[in-house]
Image: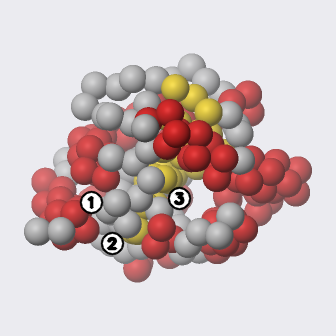
């Protein structure tokens, strides 16, 4: 079985057993999308309305912006893996609560374990705070963070503002574009240090 097939199997199994209460109000799970062999794993917050209907992450306006940013560094969605800390849409697009994030954690952890990315990129504060509880996105965006976690081989993390925030704030948009440009150098450095 290929790694991609293993990831698809994992996502199907987790969709059945995930205890997250958000599944009661969501249309379907939005496990993630991209390459099971990706060096970069992007983690956002939660699926929105469009994602909930189609079962794919980051396909609305924020997703289009993410695609443009990937293109700016000569990458595409097929080169990376994109997911969220919760796999079901919270009602009325509210923020996921800690209990829902905790219930969804085993699924995300299993994805990370299987993909084994060299770098995990947080898209927004919710993803950042699941891993770095005391950090603020306004202070650590565009910086490489290092930390060891049980069951996760990846020790390299990079924080970005959420693409949705950039759609409503021109200042954040410029910052996000600048931070995104650093990604290629960060991944090169991470790979070099790993070899």
Q: Nearer the viewer, residue 94 or 148?
A: 148
Counting other residues with Cα less than 10 Å from the Cα at mark 2, is it few (<14), some (14-19), or many (20 or more)?
some
- Above or below, 76 relative to 117: below
Residue 188, given in percent of the width and then of the height, sits at 58, 46
Give the distance between the C-alpha atoms of the residues marked 1 and 2, in whole angstroms: 8 Å
**Residue 20 can be seen, yes or no:** no
Residue assigned mark 2: 27
Residue 27, given in percent of the width and then of the height, sits at 33, 72
Instruction: Tell me which label, 3 or 2, sits earlier in the chain.
Output: 2
Give the distance between the C-alpha atoms of the residues marked 3 and 2, in whole angstroms: 13 Å
Residue 23, given in percent of the width and then of the height, sits at 28, 59
Q: Residue at x 37, y 74 (%)?
A: 55
Residue assigned mark 1: 24
**Residue 48 can be seen, yes or no:** yes
Q: Which residue appears farthest toward the right when viewing the image?
A: 171
Q: Residue at x 64, y 52 (%)?
A: 184
Give the distance between the C-alpha atoms of the residues marked 1 and 3, in whole angstroms: 15 Å
Q: Quadrant of the N terminus?
A: bottom left
Q: Residue at x 48, y 67 (%)?
A: 79
Helix, strand or loop under label 3? helix
Q: Residue at x 40, y 68 (%)?
A: 34
Counting other residues with Cα less than 10 Å from the Cα at mark 3, is it few (<14), some (14-19), or many (20 or more)?
few
Q: Quadrant of residue 25?
A: bottom left
Helix, strand or loop under label 2? loop
User: In the rendering, which numbered label is found on residue 164?
Assistant: none
Residue assigned mark 3: 93
**92 displayed left or right of 32:** right
**119 displayed left or right of 109:** right
**Which color scheme does this rendered protein use?**
secondary structure
Helix, strand or loop under label 1? helix
Q: Confirm or deny contact between disc 1 and disc 2 (CB under 8 A).
A: no
């Amino acid at each position: 079985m290929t790694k991609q097939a293993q990831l698809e199997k994992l996502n199907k199994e987790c969709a059945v057993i995930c205890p997250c209460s958000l599944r009661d109000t969501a249309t379907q799970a939005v496990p993630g999308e991209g390459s099971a062999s990706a060096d970069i794993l992007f983690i956002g917050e939660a699926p929105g309305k469009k994602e909930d209907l189609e079962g794919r992450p980051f396909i609305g306006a924020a997703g289009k912006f993410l695609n443009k940013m990937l293109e700016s560094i000569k990458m595409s969605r097929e080169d990376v893996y994109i997911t969220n800390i919760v796999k079901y849409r919270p009602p009325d697009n509210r923020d996921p609560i800690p209990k829902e994030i905790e219930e969804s954690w085993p699924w995300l952890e299993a994805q990370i374990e299987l993909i084994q990315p060299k770098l995990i990129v947080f898209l927004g504060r919710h993803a950042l705070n699941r891993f770095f509880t005391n950090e603020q996105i306004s202070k650590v965006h565009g910086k490489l963070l290092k930390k060891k976690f049980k069951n996760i081989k990846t020790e390299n993390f990079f924080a970005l503002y959420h693409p949705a925030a950039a759609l409503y704030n021109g200042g954040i948009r410029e910052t996000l574009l600048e931070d995104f440009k650093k990604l290629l150098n960060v991944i090169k450095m991470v790979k070099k240090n790993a070899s």
